Image: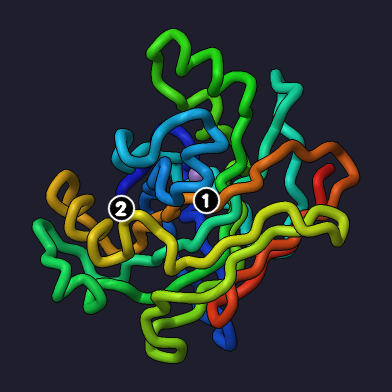
Amino acid sequence: MTRYAVPPMKIPAIEIADSTDLFPVHRIYCVGCNYAEHVREMGSDPDREPPFFFMKPSSAILSSRADFPYPSKSENVHFEVELVVAIGKGGKNISQSDANNHVFGYACGLDMTRRDLQGEMKKKSRPWEISKAFEASAPCGEICPASKIGHPSAGTIWLKVNGEIKQEGNISNLIWNIPEIIEHLSGLFELRPGDLIFTGTPAGVGPIVTGDIMEGCIDGVGTITTNVV
Ligand code: MN
């Protein structure tokens, strides 16, 4: 029997809608700049800046209905509501036409961001981890299996804070759609079952404070609710 010198990591997992099974999380990929209106609000030109990838550790997952602990060292923590793709079957160099066969399901997630630290890192052309990869930075609602809901290509995506609408868009407005993301990402990394892809956020991102309630929803996919503590 293998003995580990320190306690091994517990596998992070997300609930699956109408099931007692859990979805084990392997890696978390995130797409930046994937809705034109959001690219503009961040001060860039969507025609000149193609989407790109960054990552969070799997331990950053916060499962549905858990509280979001406001992170240290930031005065400006932002929500970004996103469609999350859960990979069920791995592969390299997956074509767009085959991409859906690799998807287990979809969820509504939040790419929580220390915006002040991200700004400093951008200015210095440094990596983004301190702004994106902190504990609990990836709240994610229940996964809806594609076997039940199909492969959504349109639907309203919104986020409310304390009942007030802050972000609203439609997943049909993704600059790169899901098959395109899977084709591109699987050319860079061998995708594995358990990988998640946060596909980018629509316009309207903004700050939260302790005591706020964040509620996200993607029509036909799912919801997420978390309290900032
Ligand atoms: Mn994001």
Measuring from the top left, give residue 18's x and y in whole percent. 58, 88
For mark 1, what is the residue? 201
Q: Is tag 2's residue or tag 1's residue first in the polypeptide sequence?
A: 2
Left or right: 228 in relation to 58: right
Residue 140, quarter of picture:
bottom right
- Residue visible at 61% across and 42% down? 112
CB at disc 1 and ligand 1 closer than 8 Å: yes
Residue 76, quarter of picture:
top right
Q: Which mark is residue 24?
A: none
Q: Please state which of the two labelled residues, at mark 2 or mark 1, is closer to the viewer.
A: 1
- The answer to which of 127 and 49 lies nearer the viewer is 49
Say which element carries label 1.
loop
Residue 30 appearing in the image: no
- Name which residue type carries label 1: Thr
Q: Which of the colour schemes (rainbow, by chain, secondary structure, one colour) is used?
A: rainbow
**Between marks 2 and 1, how big is the CA–CA gap?**
45 Å
For mark 2, what is the residue? 1
In the figure, 115 relative to 211: above or below?
above
- The answer to which of 11 and 205 lies nearer the viewer is 205
Measuring from the top left, give residue 133's x and y in whole percent. 51, 34
Left or right: 135 in relation to 184: right
Residues at circles 2 and 1 in contact by the CB criterion of under 8 Å: no
Residue 75, quarter of picture:
top right
Residue 137 appearing in the image: yes
- Name which residue type carries label 2: Met
CB at disc 2 and ligand 1 closer than 8 Å: no
Say which element carries label 2.
loop
